[in-house]
Amino acid sequence: MALLAAPATLGVPVKVTQKALRVLCLDGGAAGARRAWSLAPGPHRLSATMANAPRTGAPEADAQPGNAQVTFTLEAGHRYEVEVRGLVKSFAFRAWRRGEWKPLVRDRTADREASGEPEWVEAACR
């Protein structure tokens, strides 16, 4: 006779969609190389940087991307993606300068932004 298990509580899916975005910390702890999570509904904090890989001859080759931190609140039953907003030249040259890009958490279920403006921080995890 098989035992039936109680249904597991499912977390809220959050996925990074921009390949150059490097999540450094999630809720104060190191994120490692992960690019997707299942998180509890409620408030969260994410710190990230961009991986510069300038094209040959890019005028922004010495750009320093900095560390941006955003807060957001997840709702149960929704699906979220972390994307990047920035200057067109940053995408074209693959060189990111602090303050010229920002991570954005988007609620794909409700088609709206779930995060506010980033705070630029020196230490990614705090």
Image (tube, rainbow, N blue to C red):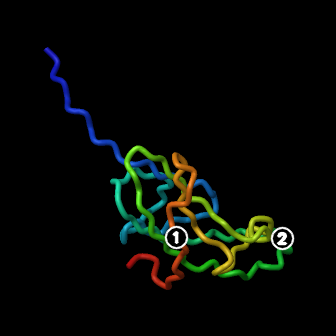
Which mark is drawn over residue 116? 1
Secondary structure beneath label 1: loop
Q: Position of residue 86 (x, y in %)?
A: 70, 69
Residue closer to the observer: 111 or 31: 111
The amino acid sitting under disc 2 is Thr
**Residue at horizontal 48 percent and vertical 69 percent from the top:** 24
Type of the residue with mark 1: Gly
Mark 2–mark 1 CB contact (< 8 Å)? no
Q: Residue furthest bottom?
A: 122
**Furthest-left residue in this view:** 1
- Position of the C terminus, as image quadrant, is bottom left
Above or below, 104 against 38 in this view is below
The location of residue 54, given as percent across then percent down, is 76, 70
Tell me how far mark 2 sits from mark 1, CA to CA: 34 Å
Relative to residue 97, is residue 9 drawn left or right? left
Residue plotted at (59% across, 80% down): 66
* In the displayed structure image, the side of residue 47 where residue 102 appears, left or right: right
Please rate how many residues cluster around mark 1, counting C-alpha atoms within 10 Å: few if below 14, some from 14 to 19, many from 20: some
Q: Which residue is mark 2?
A: 56
Q: Position of residue 49 (x, y in %)?
A: 57, 72
Mark 2 closeness class: few <14, some 14–19, many ≥20 residues within 10 Å: few
Q: Which element carries disc 2, helix, strand or loop?
A: loop
The image shows residue 110 at horizontal and vertical percentages of 52, 49
Locate the N terminus by quadrant: top left
Quadrant of residue 56 within the rendered picture:
bottom right
Q: How many marks?
A: 2
**Which residue is rendered at x = 37% and y = 53% of the image?**
39
